[in-house]
Amino acid sequence: MSDKQVALSRYHVEDEGNSVAGWIGVTIMILGTIVGTVGMFIEMDVVTYVGVGLVALGAIAWPILKAAGLGPKGHGH
């Protein structure tokens, strides 16, 4: 193993930022994107706006859930 690989491996974080808050926020935003896309294809403005609202809800829910303690845990660095 080279010196560069050894140096980089010392700082590897196993969870890579995964958290319940992140997963829930991104899942809501992905569902919003799907709903909005379907709304555009079937030409229903209400469905499209619901999708846009879901994307905004996911973006708002993420930091709220993080503040509630569901964010990434400390790694002791």
Image (cartoon, helix red, strand yellow):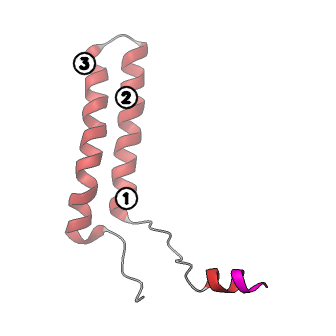
Would residue 60 be found to the left or right of residue 26 on screen? left
Q: Position of residue 67 (x, y in %)?
A: 21, 67
Q: Which badge, 3 or 1, comes first in the chain's sequence?
A: 1
Residue 9's image quarter? Answer: bottom right
Mark 1: amino acid:
Gly
Query: Which range of residues does the magenta coloring cover?
Result: 1-5
- Residue 36, above or below 23: above
Residue at coordinates 26% horizontally, 24% vertically from top-left?
49
Residue at coordinates 39% horizontally, 16% vertically from top-left?
40
Return the residue at label 1: 22
Residue 46: which disc? 3
Residue at coordinates 32% horizontally, 68% vertically from top-left?
71
Q: Quadrant of the N terminus?
A: bottom right
Would residue 47 be found to the left or right of residue 9 on screen? left
How far apart marks 2 and 3 lie (CA) works out to: 10 Å
Q: Nearer the viewer, mark 3 or mark 1?
A: 1
Residue 35: which disc? 2
Mark 2: amino acid:
Val
Q: Position of residue 76 (x, y in %)?
A: 40, 89
Q: Residues within 10 Å of mark 2 (few under 14, many from 20)?
A: many
Q: Residues within 10 Å of mark 1 (few under 14, many from 20)?
A: many
Name the magenta segment's main secondary structure: helix
Pointer 2 with pointer 3, Cβ within 8 A: no
How far apart marks 3 and 1 lie (CA) works out to: 27 Å
SS for dot 2: helix
How far apart marks 2 and 1 lie (CA) works out to: 20 Å
Residue at coordinates 36% horizontally, 42% vertically from top-left?
29
